[in-house]
Image (cartoon, rainbow, N blue to C red):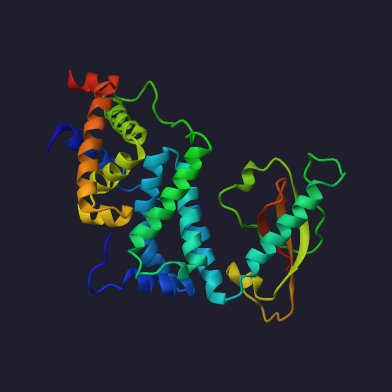
Amino acid sequence: MPPDSNDPSDAQLVARTGAGDEAAWEALFARYGKVLYRFALRSTGAPDAADEIVQEVFLTLIRRSDGFDPRRGALSSYLFGAARNQIARRMRSGPVLAEPEEGVTDETPLDELSETERLDAVRRGVQALPQNYREVVILCDLEEMSYEQAGAALAIPVGTVRSRLSRGRGLLERKLALEPALQEGQR
Amino acid sequence: MSEIEKLLAEAAEADRNLGPSPEVQRALGASVRARRTKRPWLWAAAAALATVGLFLSQSTEPRGAAVVESAPMQTTEFFVLDPVRPIEEMRSGRLVRVTLPADAPDYFGLPMGGRSGPVEADVLLGDDGIARAVRFIQ
């Protein structure tokens, strides 16, 4: 996610995007589009809600690009902060319901079904974590960010990232121990 | 690596290619292009149309069936304005004829054809008054 030293900075890309530079926009979206979507998806569990959150966050950035001040923090903090607000707003107005997934039928091979169920159990477990722990687990374990990157994105110290991650993993482990799909997988 | 970290790594690998829908990407790209033209008419037009739509939806006309005025002139295809609410899911709506600036078709990648004056367009409004799609009168 962080740019190489030869690449334009986030601040440069934001300024150029605000002026209508499509190449800059594409570079910006390539850096943050997917990671923000997955962050929203893993928090809400609903692809439609995740799409809407990504759209809202980036529309605000595009329309009011001067609202991002690189002197006040990293772009990742700005984007994840906006996404967290959107997620919290949706959570306050009730649970976000995802469409039931298609594709799992009686003809699905047992191995494949088991794999799908295991991963679904992990996703449900992450989604059910308290927000503080869920966010660091998503960024550090699922997005493979460093503690420093996750700390910048969430605007919290590295030490807090470490402690929340440890606590979040512990909570998740206990939640998953109760999942039938995982118990069967361990037999 | 602990068991829980292995499971999370598996989930991370399985979801690695997940990303926003193409509709969202297109809508955001269109917003960037609108900045380039420095004519944010679309937002103003959408807001104005939403007001018109709300007014129409509160009128005493019977609701339900879509009201589509006949358009004897040739028209372009419809261009989606609101990817979050697909046209296909509309049960009813209204078509409103509006006049837009000359460069409005350019926003959708349509050739200007040497036109310099305002252009006419049909805007499809949902029952909620939100503009869903637009087509241009050729």
Q: In what quadrant of the picture does the N terminus of chain A appear?
A: bottom left
Q: Residue furthest left?
A: B1
At x 49% / y 66%, what residue is drawn? A62
At x 39% / y 41%, what residue is drawn? A43
Q: Residue furthest right?
A: B60
Whether residue A68 is visible, yes or no, is yes
Whether residue B123 is visible, yes or no, is no
Vertical order, B103 against B29 (above or below): below
Find residue A40 and report its horizontal and vertical position in percent: 40, 46
Find residue B131 and report its horizontal and vertical position in percent: 68, 55
User: Which residue is more in the foreground, A154 or B129?
Assistant: A154
Q: In what quadrant of the picture does the C terminus of chain A appear?
A: top left
Find residue A116 and report its horizontal and vertical position in percent: 31, 30
Vertical order, A103 against A11 (above or below): above
- Horizontal side, residue A71 vs residue A92: left or right: left
User: Which residue is more in the foreground, A128 or B52?
Assistant: A128
User: Which residue is more in the foreground, A136 or B73?
Assistant: A136
Dividing the picture into quadrants, the one containing residue A115 is top left
Find residue A161 and report its horizontal and vertical position in percent: 23, 47
> How many numbered marks, from 0 up?
0
At x 24% / y 53%, what residue is drawn? A157
At x 57% / y 76%, what residue is drawn? B38
Dividing the picture into quadrants, the one containing residue B103 is bottom right
